[in-house]
Amino acid sequence: MGMRDRFNRLTGKTRLVVARLMLHLAGDEVAPLLGVLNQAAFRALEADGDLTTVGEGLIDIAQALLQRELYWQAAANEGDICWSEAEADDLFTELFTDSGERYLSGDSIGGDDKDDLQIPITQNLVVMITVAYEGEEAALEANLGDLAALREGLKALINLHYQERLRAIQVHFSPAALGEVLSEDQALENFPELVPL
């Protein structure tokens, strides 16, 4: 713990952490995850962003990702410790905006060939989870570039919800809808920070 951290704790400031986790999945069984992701997004919209509802969706997403470990290809995480809500809000907004700009995908429903009734199924999916939480969570503040650490990081997200320490949650994913396709090249080009697992 640095001198600044000690000083801020002594003066009673709340430690806030803003963190983003990215996970690239590839294979035949990644497309069904879009259903879990879109269902959580729909529930969050219906609840007008209620943090408890969004947190329950985060649990569903984290559990679905943990069940599909076989398809994990690459991951990355980043974040920072903040000692003021304004600083945490600025960082959360920055990561939110960056994640939102990564909705790039290729082929979608449409076209004029004889396979018009066939929906393209993506073989690649990148999930981006951004959270702000109170206190310390070593499993999320470490490098999540290996399978065991990533597994613990996803479990930590679930625990943060149950401990009521989450302050903000945002989930982005690319492609964003069934029928859109994210190619391997697009995943590499648009998510350069991903490290193979």
Image: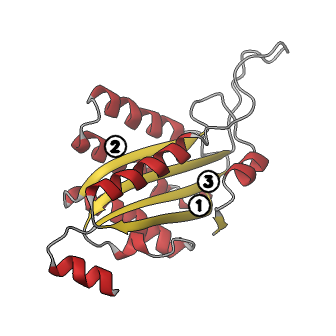
Residue type at tag 3: Leu
Rendered view: 43 above or below 173: above
* Residue plotted at (34% across, 43% down): 57
Residue type at tag 2: Gly
Report whether residue 54 is seen.
yes
- Indicate left or right for 194 with 94 as reference: right
Between the residue at mark 2 and the residue at mark 1, the CA separation in whole angstroms equals: 22 Å
In primary-sequence order, the first of circles 2 and 1 is 2
Between the residue at mark 3 and the residue at mark 2, the CA separation in whole angstroms equals: 19 Å
Secondary element at tag 3? strand
**Pointer 2: what residue?**
57
Q: Looking at this view, is 170 or 79 the one in front?
A: 79
Label 1: few (<14), some (14–19) or many (≥20) C-alpha neighbours in 10 Å: few
Contact, CB < 8 Å: mark 3 with mark 2?
no
**Pointer 3: what residue?**
25
The circle drawn on residue 122 is none
**Pointer 1: what residue?**
70
Q: How many labels does the image show?
A: 3
Q: Looking at this view, is 144 or 71 the one in front?
A: 144
Estimate the x, y position of residue 133 in percent, counting from the top left: 29, 60
Residue type at tag 1: Leu
Between the residue at mark 1 and the residue at mark 3, the CA separation in whole angstroms equals: 9 Å
Mark 1 or 3: in front is: 3
In primary-sequence order, the first of circles 3 and 2 is 3
